[in-house]
Image (cartoon, rainbow, N blue to C red):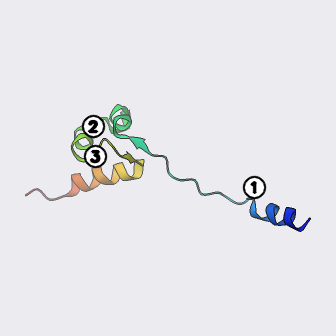
Amino acid sequence: MAKQKEQEDKQPTADQSVAMPAPQYAVRQYLQSETYKADRDILVALLDEQQLYTPAEVQDVIDRFKTQEAI
């Protein structure tokens, strides 16, 4: 009985939110996306095709590229 109560305590309830990891996508998926249509050249040049990226990571790469000072 005590073990069952411990297991019930560990499971999240409806008011507790479970943190889900941010979704990650392949570079080719971002290149096909309408959202990143204007920035495809940046993505091709700066992202590694063997890695997965979250939308926040991709947007950060784009923003840093656009705001960096030209040499």
Asked which secondary structure carries label 3, the reply is: loop
In this rendering, the count of numbered labels is: 3
x and y, in percent, of residue 63 in the image: 28, 53
The residue located at (81%, 66%) in the rendering is: 6
Label 1: which secondary element: loop
Q: Position of residue 18 (x, y in %)?
A: 64, 57
User: Measured along the vertical axis of the image, is residue 31 above or below residue 65?
Assistant: above
* Residue count near mark 1 (Cα–Cα under 10 Å), binned few <14, some 14–19, many ≥20: few
Q: Residue at x 28, y 45 (%)?
A: 48
Q: CA distance from mark 1 to mark 2?
A: 41 Å
Question: Whole-percent x and y of residue 19?
Answer: 59, 57
Residue under numbered circle 2: 38
The residue that appears at 89% across and 68% down in the rendered structure is 2
Query: Which residue is painted at 42% across and 42% down in the image?
Result: 25
* Location of residue 11 with respect to 41 vertically, above or below: below
Disc on res. 14: 1
**Left or right side of 66 for 51:** right
Q: Name the quarter where the C terminus is drawn.
A: bottom left
- Other-residue count near label 3 (Cα within 10 Å), few / some / many at <14 / 14–19 / ≥20: some
Q: Does label 2 or label 3 sit earlier along the sequence?
A: 2
**Residue type, mark 3 in image:** Leu
- Name the residue carrying label 3: 47
Work out whether mark 1 precedes mark 3 in sequence or the reverse, and give the earlier one: 1
Task: Give the SS element for disc 2.
Answer: helix
Dot 2 and dot 3 residues touching (CB under 8 Å): no
Q: Amino acid at mark 2?
A: Ala
Front of the two marks 1 and 3: 3
**Residue 49 figure quarter:** top left
Between 18 and 66, which is closer to the camera in this rendering? Answer: 18
Mark 2–mark 3 distance (CA, rounded to whole Å): 15 Å
